[in-house]
Image (cartoon, rainbow, N blue to C red):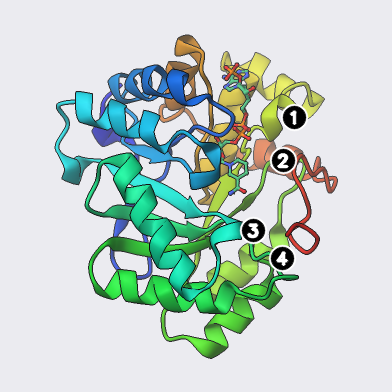
Amino acid sequence: MSTTAVPTVTLNNGVEIPQLGFGVFQVPDDQTTTAVTAALEAGYRSIDTAAVYGNEAGVGRALAASDLARQDLFITTKLWNADQGHDATLRAFDASLEKLGLDHVDLYLIHWPAPAHDRYADSWRAIERLAAEGRIRAAGVSNFQPAHLRRLLETSDLVPAVNQVELHPGLQQSELRAFHTAHGIATEAWSPLAQGAVLDDPAVTAIAERTGKSPAQVVLRWHLQLGNIVIPKSVTPARIRQNLDVLDFDLSAQDMAAIAATDRDLRTGPHPDQFN
Ligand code: NDP
């Protein structure tokens, strides 16, 4: 798999992010180095971690052991809810960089709006500063609803480059995606496979059988054709490779419509309005 084949999405500040990356949620730190190394060998160049995953150090060890140039990698991490607030954000960011063994990240996200704490606008102020200092190439958010995004748009000149949200055929987020498009925010899909929960959908398996692709490949292809950035997770080497091998086929308009019809408010994670 050639890495040049992975398309990129140009963010609102001109930075390019690979449209297909690798996620490491729920991978224990000691297994993360092996998984990320397998992903880099397979051709992934974008890695998505978070402070709360407890595996930034494991990601960092894989990056240090790889002979890839830093500018060819795209590393995302996230600010945990307990570290929100202006000064706490600056400290948490330093701790993440230290664990990753990096002097900058490509994308830094506020992990959840955590509206009951009401500190995300202050956290964003700190992120503006980190971006101005060049320690973050792109700044974004995760799990933000339109109301949370509107608040940042009203109080800051820095428009989030990305909103990373739960998105898969069972939760298609059409309204949020339209909001993103209207404001120049890229949509990044977490749990793009719904942690496996959509892989038995008849609409998906029918396309898989016809195209000779796996259900996971069909779902990832659907995301790419919608324009989503995706970060599937696997610790299984064959799946790690399989999930990147989605660039040589197309879903027809009819296939896209068949999957569109499976939207059903299926959440595998918490609702952003309630999670603090
Ligand atoms: P995914 O939708 O990526 O699904 C991962 C699960 O699917 C694992 O159990 C994996 O198994 C399995 N799987 C992977 N590939 C295949 C395949 N080809 N065929 C069959 N099964 C497969 O779930 P995640 O929740 O991990 O989401 C992806 C990433 O999104 C996370 O790792 C994280 O980086 C990010 N994320 C962000 C959140 C946020 O709040 N911002 C919340 C949740 C996730 P196995 O590993 O055993 O192979």
Nearer the camera: disc 3 or disc 1: 3
Query: Which badge, 1 or 4, is on the more N-terminal residue?
Result: 4
- Distance Cα–Cα, label 1 vs label 2: 7 Å
Q: Quadrant of ligand 1?
A: top right
Residue at the image position 38 percent from the left and 25 percent from the top? 36
Q: Which residue is mark 1?
A: 198
Mark 1–mark 4 distance (CA, rounded to whole Å):
21 Å
- Give the SS element for disc 4: helix
Q: Residue 219: image x %, image y %? A: 62, 32
In the image: residue 268, left or right of residue 132: right
Q: Earlier in the sequence, mark 3 or mark 2?
A: 3
Q: Are the residues flagged by discs 3 and 1 in contact, CB closer than 8 Å?
A: no
- Distance from disc 3 to disc 2, alpha carbons, whole Å, reads 17 Å
Observer-side mark, 3 or 4, equals: 3
Q: Nearer the viewer, residue 202 or 117?
A: 117
Please name the amino acid that badge 4 sits on.
Glu
Q: Residue at horizontal 53%, vertical 49%?
A: 228
Task: Report the residue marked by disc 4.
Answer: 175
The amino acid type, in three-letter code, at marker 2 is Pro
Circle 2 sits on which residue? 169
Q: Quadrant of the C terminus?
A: bottom right
Disc 3 under 8 Å from ligand 1? The reply is yes
Coordinates of residue 40 in the picture (x, y in percent): 31, 25
Q: Is residue 127 visible?
A: yes
Looking at the picture, does residue 268 appear above or below residue 38?
A: below
Disc 3 marks which residue?
Answer: 143
Q: How many marks?
A: 4
> Marks 1 and 2: CB-CB under 8 Å?
yes
**Which comes sooner in the sequence, label 1 or label 2?**
2
